[in-house]
Image (cartoon, rainbow, N blue to C red):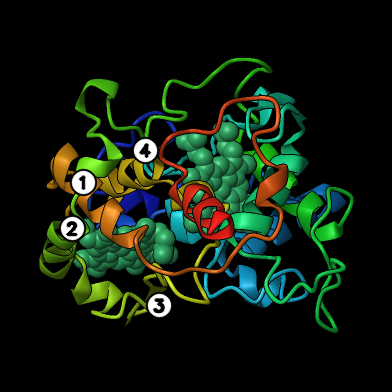
Amino acid sequence: MLDPNLRPYELNGPLVPATASMVSAWDIPDHPPTSTELDGAEVSARVRRGYRLFMNTSVEASRLTPSGMSCGNCHLNAGQRELALPLVGSAGMFPEYNRRAGYDFSLEDRIVGCFMRSMNATDGVDEDGALPDGRVTPSPELDEIGALADYIRWVSRNHSEGENPAWRKQNRIPPEALIPIDELDPIRGEELFTTHCTQCHGADGQGVQIGDKLAGPLWGPRSWNDGAGAARVYTLAGIIRFMMPYLNPGVLTDEEAQQIAAFITSKPRPSYPYKAQDYQTEPRPIDAVYYDREEAARGR
Ligand code: HEC
Ligand code: HEC
C-alpha cells in the first residue's frame, strides 16, 4: 500500500493515472482497510469484506469459483485505475440494459455476470446444471455478491445516480482502427506476445508470480471462460491496449493490441455452458469468436 503523502504523481480525479508504473501498482486511493471514512458499522464491515473478496476472490469466495484469478486482476488497483476497467462511479449507472442478456441488470446481476464468465464459476457443472460438491452458483442474494456490491457502491459514493463517469467504458479500440477479424494474424500476435508479455505471463500464458502480484492465466482451464467479455477479440484488445504491459501501458499500437488479442483468443479456454441463451434479442457481436467456432463445430 502506497502512502498517499508520498504519491509521486497526481491522481486523475479519484483514479490512479493510466500512465504511472511500478510505484502506482500498489496505490489504492480509496483503501477500505485503512480508510477513516469507514467505521464499526455493519455496512463498513461489508465494504471491507467486499474489498477482500475483490482482491483475493478465489480464496475469499472459494465456494463460488475455482478460478486462478481475482476481480482485481482485470479491474486494476481494485477498480480505481484509469483505463483499466475502473468501477468508481459505476454503481449509480445500474439498473442498466444488458445487450447480451436482453434485459435490465442490477449492480448485483452485473457482478454475478463477471463471476459466471470472467471468473468461470460454471467450471465443472454437469448436464443438469449441478456443480461439484461444496460449490454454489453465484446469485444476486448471496452474501459475497452483496459485499462486493457494497464495496463498489462505496467507491461510487461521491457520484450521483445516473451520472455516467467520463472514465467509464473507455477501454475501447476506436471504431476506425478496428481490423476485420479474419485479417488478424494469430502468428503475428504470438510474436508480439513473446516480445511484450511472456516475461510476466509465461510462454505458456499461465502467469508468473511477481512479488505479491500474480499475472493471471490468459488461457487454459484456470482462465476466464469463452462466454466472458475478455474472450471477445476487440474487448480483449481494448483491455491490453491501455493497461498492458503492466509497467509500461500504452506502448502497444491499436493494431498490435488486436493481433495479440487474436492470438490469445485462438487458444482453448473453459466453455461457458449457457452460450446458446446469450444474444437472443440483440445481434451477436462479430468479435464473439468462440460462439462462432462452437456453432461451426456443432454443424459439422
Ligand atoms: C477477465 C477479466 C475480468 C475479471 C476477472 C472480472 N471482470 Fe468485471 N468486467 C470485465 C470487463 C471486460 C467488463 C466490461 C467493461 C466495459 O464495458 O468497459 C467488466 C465489467 C464489470 C462491471 C460493470 C462496470 C460498469 O461500469 O458497467 C462490474 C460491476 C464488474 N465488472 C465487477 C467485477 C467483479 C466484482 C469481479 C470479480 C468477481 C470482476 N468484475 C471480475 C472484466 C473482468
Ligand atoms: C511486468 C509484468 C507484466 C507484463 C510484461 C505484462 N503483464 Fe499482463 N498482468 C500483469 C499482472 C501483475 C497482472 C495482474 C494485475 C493485478 O492483479 O493487479 C496482469 C493482468 C493481465 C490481464 C488481466 C487478466 C489476467 O489474466 O490477469 C491481461 C488480459 C493481461 N495482463 C495481458 C497482458 C498482455 C497481452 C501482455 C503483453 C502485451 C501483458 N499482459 C504484459 C503483469 C504483466
Picture coordinates of residue 87, whole percent (x, y): 54, 39
Mark 4 or mark 2: which is in front?
2
Q: Which mark is residue 82?
A: 4
**First reached walking from the N terminus: tag 4 or tag 2:** 4
Mark 1 or mark 4: which is in front?
1
In the rendered image, the vertical position of residue 234 relative to residue 73, given as above or below: above
Whether the residue carrying mark 1 lies under 8 Å from ligand 2 is answered with: no
The local secondary structure at tag 3 comes to loop
The answer to whether the residue labelled 3 contacts the one labelled 2, judged by CB atoms less than 8 Å apart, is no
Left or right, residue 265 beside residue 133: left
Q: Which mark is residue 212?
A: 3
For the N terminus, the image quarter is bottom left
Residue at 54%, 18% in the rendered image: 164
**Tally of numbered discs:** 4
Alpha-carbon span between mark 3 and mark 1:
35 Å
Picture coordinates of residue 94, whole percent (x, y): 71, 27
The answer to whether the residue labelled 4 contacts the one labelled 2, judged by CB atoms less than 8 Å apart, is no
Of residues 5 and 296, the one nearer the viewer is 296
Amino acid residing under circle 3: Asp
In the rendered image, the vertical position of residue 141 relative to residue 254, given as above or below: below
The local secondary structure at tag 2 comes to helix
Give the image quarter of residue 194. bottom left
The answer to whether the residue labelled 3 contacts the one labelled 4, judged by CB atoms less than 8 Å apart, is no
Q: Local crowd at mark 2 within 10 Å, few (<14), some, or many (≥20)?
A: many
Q: Which residue is mark 1?
A: 184
Alpha-carbon span between mark 3 and mark 4:
22 Å
